[in-house]
Image (cartoon, helix red, strand yellow):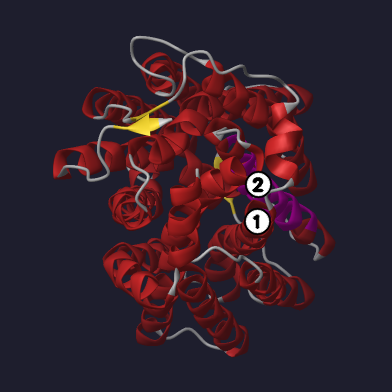
Amino acid sequence: MKTTSDSLSIKTKIGYGVGDFGANMVFQSVVLYLMFYLTDVFLIPASVAGTIFLIAKIWDAVSDPMMGYISDKTRSRWGQKRPYLLFGAIPLGLSMALLFYTPSLGDEAKILYALVMFLLVCTAYTVVNIPYGALTANLTLDSNERSRLTGYRMFCAVVGTLLVAGATKPLAGLFQNPVEGWRFVGVLYGAIAAVFTLITFASVRERVQHSETEEYRLKDIATTLSVNKPFIFLSIGVFMHLCAIGVLASMVNYLFKYNFNKEDFIPIAFLSMFATAAVAIPLWVFISNKIGKKHAFNIGMGLLAVILVVLYFAKQFNFAFFTVLFVAAGVSVSTVFFSPWAMIPDTVEYSQWKTGLRREGIIYGFFYFSQKLAAACAGFITGIGLTLCGYIQPKVINNILTAQIQSCDTLTGLKILTTLIPLALIICGIVFISLYPIDEKMHKDIVQKI
């Protein structure tokens, strides 16, 4: 293994970062709106929609690690990881458009269509984003430079999230028929995802080079992961945190629509949170470099836990109060955008130190799977939770989707799903992140040894 240079140009950092802007047009659409779209637009039962999320992630359990293994074995004139950005961009955009196409079908056909299209989106996302994420470890070996690179990437990711969070419902609302509106959103976001993936392909070059004679074997998957305790602790902690945020994000749609009768506040809530998250990323880069990545991560998520407690006890809608609350949530959520991606590259060298094998594709494959599993579990928890608390879906009356009145018990259930369930998951996540052992000094020692 060798690297041409540890420092990266601004052009490279920006070019790499914008890839996650495109990726989050897909990923955040799923996290923030797919459950709401399936239940309130495509009119699939909530429990069935939750099960679709879970089935898709069972497939990811196979495809993500295998994609990492395949990308590690790849040798081409474009490098190891970049070819998959080039050839996966268009399928990613097309599958996104098809997911939100909303064809007129019978009940059983709707379920089958939603499942197949979601599987296609998950597969295309895997083909592009497992290699994309692993590029961080292939661009530089310097831990602090990786933090800065991750800062650029996560700023772009949060901007993409911000666009999805704030613009999706207004864009869908441009059309009188919600079906046409969501169809437009799918096409637009799919096109953006494809274009920015191609921009990243054209903007970066892989700098950490591998031996051309190194043998790659399937058993390397078990070898790479079994000794990598930092990766295991980080993956479980991030899974807990992202599952919590996924449930919170999905339930915000229902909380303000039914508990507070303020559906028009939903885009404002998301904008307040994710705009602040984007602005706060440099703050967390600074804090991470001062006190360490895991400590910064835990501080941020601890703040979110406090905010969820406050939200649980909120009884009446107040615009200023909720805006400030979601701004504060944005500061804390910023850490989950930045910290995991600043920490995961260091586990690549840890594994190499322990095994003699550098398998960043395998590591990133499983790490992406843990994140997508979190999104799936969040969707499953939300779907089952909605069913258990007696949620009544909108009905088509005179060709118009009409929201139904929810019972007091249902409204209580919606609030618990929005706050206390994510709170419990965050507490578990903080415990696992606390066990992550790699700091800057340890990483420098490892790099010197390998």
Secondary structure of residue under mark 1: helix
Tag 1 residue: 239
Q: Is residue 353 visible?
A: yes
At 26% across and 29% down in the image, what residue appears?
204
Going from the N terminus, do you reach mark 1 or mark 2 first?
Answer: 1
Secondary structure of residue under mark 2: helix
Q: Quadrant of residue 410?
A: bottom right
Q: Is residue 314 above or below residue 414?
A: below
Q: How many marks?
A: 2
Q: Is residue 358 above or below residue 305?
A: above
Residue farthest toward the front in the current orientation of the protein: 449
Name the foreground residue: 129 vs 25.
129
Position in image of residue 12 (x %, y %):
21, 38
Characterize the magenta stretch by its predominant secondary structure: helix
Judge left or right: residue 435 versus residue 341.
right
Q: Identify the disc placed on residue 291.
A: none
Position in image of residue 383 (x %, y %):
74, 52
* Marks 1 and 2 in Cβ contact (< 8 Å): yes
Judge left or right: residue 6 versus residue 88.
left
Name the foreground residue: 282 vs 329.
282
Q: Identify the disc placed on residue 370.
A: 2
Q: Which residues are magenta?
A: 365-384
Q: Is residue 74 above or below residue 399?
A: above
Query: As shown in the figure, which amino acid type bears the numbered disc 1?
Result: Phe
